[in-house]
Amino acid sequence: MCGLSGEFRFDGEPPDLEGLARISAVMEPRGPDGHGLWHHGRVALAHRRLKIIDLTEAGAQPMVDDELGLVTVFNGCIYNYQQLREELSGYGYRFFSTSDTEVIGKAYHRWGVECVDRFMGMFAFAVFERRTGRLILGRDRLGIKPLYLAQSAERLRFASSLPALLAGGDIDTSIDPVALNFYMSFHAVVPPPYTILTGVRKLPPATVRVVEPDGTSTDRHYWSPAHQRTDRYAGLTENDWQDLVLDTLQTAVERRMVADVPVGVLLSGGIDSSVIVALLAKAGQHDLQTFSIGFERVGDREGDEFEFSDIIAKEFDTRHHKLMMPSSTVLDGLDGAVGAMAEPMVSHDCIAFYLLSQAVSQHVTVVQSGQGADELLAGYDWYPPLADVQPERALEVYSGRFFDRDKATMDGILQPRWTIPDDAPRGFVEAHLNRAGADTALDRVLRLDSQVMLVDDPVKRVDNMTMAWGLEARTPFLDHEFAELAAAVPPALKLAQGGKGVLKEASRKVLPWQIIDRKKGHFPVPAIINLEGPYLARVRDALLAPAARDRGLFNPDYVATLLADPNRRRTPLGSNQLWQLGLLEMWLQRHGVG
């Protein structure tokens, strides 16, 4: 919904208002409808606003609540803010706006750091207590909204994007070797607190951090659903599970219609986005705007899935927009997407989402999207091999399917100063898989993917690319109540029919069969599946640039081997290895870091 930022001094000096203004300016695309800056003593808060709830100036931020002595900045949406407002009014709280931002401040005043347990939504927020001088930072359960941090002995700066923090200056922009090893092995997923830069960290999802005036802090991690079978759902039949999945998703979809502006749907024509449209129609939504993107065919590669999105648009009588992108736009989309990335991401979907968001933002400000179903309900092809695997072998099977390369291979690609003595990515994944609270190998991997991979790949991708155009994406599959239910669904029901079986069968009750029985789709961008022409030139130029040579990340002989045959070497997931290396250098050079 917005872009927030701030500076909190620990040394008694006033905050750098000019630096904070530069940080905030970078986030103007996230919030083009207004901006604000508040400062007092050792703290300053800034905000860029996208007007979605309470379109008046009463909803502007930073929001100062003089009666409670709190100042709040917030990015996201609290879908149950009206119910919370009513509850807080019963405790005697008086409201001066109709915004969800004000609810956050008053909820914190009433319930302290436990306020997040009551929030249904996506959020990153900062609340400053003027009486105690404490700063409270919070992030939603599934990390839908980001919060980046740069802390030194003298101060803490924070913002909704990493490039924004860089604009403030005085950041250690050296490459973090541990993060680089995650990028190269864990399919570009760099989990918190790391980022690719040594001087920038990120607040983990489902975390509230209380920062004291002296810079010390304490964290409360407040959510992690059990991936186990529980008494609560004992005795359910397959049909019962299907009904429960559909009913819980129905509630999640309806929650995400709360807005003072129209809400559309990104409609790919796959099951996930199609069932959202079907459930909105069931809830009585009329004249719903839906949006599908397509690209020109390249050779024998299709570039659109309009055949399927057309079926849904006709079935539910939506106001459908088919957005065909000529191949000439993809190159500009590549450059734009790299600029919009808060961190380097290798998925081609970034470019499709970037171009789609640019077009959709001309029509609506808010859309619902189907991200998250695959990670919660076992929709990817690396999940079925886990079906009959003992939990102790989960790491072996998962890493063989998902990891881009092992440590020995990675050490041969990176120049020696970037290698690390231990295998941090594998150790991290192993520790996560071995935590208590997950029964089977599949349960362990789904917990990892939903709490780590999902956050720092698909969810981050959607936030970055939509907010680059002032478009808010809402993801009903990432409703935390739906995520809790999905975690409890028996593995066999999730793995049925090649994955997402319980959702596929549930969807037969509301969708045409052609959508359910089709081959799994994706955002096709044919022009960059194989690197050729100007796309290959972009990658080559980045890897051979003086900045890349000076940085010296990769073994020159390995880079030469990739450039000699650009499309031969791919990771187990099918990603082009040359693209992965080139994208990292393009990002570093675009943002002038490293």
Image: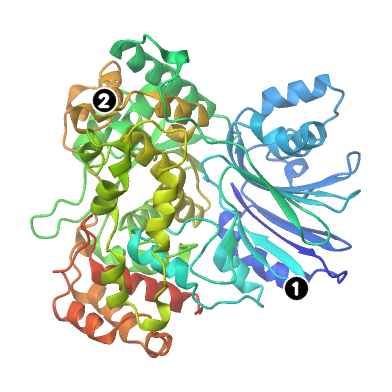
What residue would you read off at disc 1? 18
Q: Position of residue 486 (x, y in %)?
A: 40, 28
The reply to whether residue 362 is in sight is no
What residue is at 38 percent from the left and 71 percent from the top? 584
Height in image: 259 above or below 492? below
Height in image: 234 above or below 328? above
Q: Which mark is residue 226?
A: none
Tag 1 secondary structure? helix
Depth check: give the residue in front, 419 or 570: 419
Q: Position of residue 53 (x, y in %)?
A: 64, 37
What residue would you read off at disc 2? 492
Along the horizontal axis of the image, is 103 left or right of 476? Answer: right
The reply to whether residue 183 is in sight is yes
Depth check: give the residue in front, 449 or 320: 449
Q: Are marks 2 and 1 in contact (CB under 8 Å)?
A: no
Q: Amino acid at mark 2?
A: Ala
| Local crowd size for mark 2, using a 10 Å CA cut-off: few (<14), some (14–19), many (≥20) | some
First in residue order: circle 2 vs circle 1: 1
Give the label, 2 or 1, closer to the camera.
2
| Local crowd size for mark 1, using a 10 Å CA cut-off: few (<14), some (14–19), many (≥20) | few
What residue is at 77 percent from the left and 32 percent from the top? 111
Q: Quadrant of residue 108?
A: top right
Tag 2 secondary structure? helix
Depth check: give the residue in front, 355 or 70: 70
Q: Position of residue 515 (x, y in %)?
A: 21, 29
Height in image: 568 above or below 558? above
Q: CA distance from mark 2 to mark 1?
A: 56 Å
Q: Quadrant of residue 245?
A: top left
Residue at the left extreme, as displayed: 300
Q: Amino acid at mark 1?
A: Glu
Q: Position of residue 118 (x, y in %)?
A: 66, 29
What residue is at 37 percent from the left and 52 percent from the top? 353
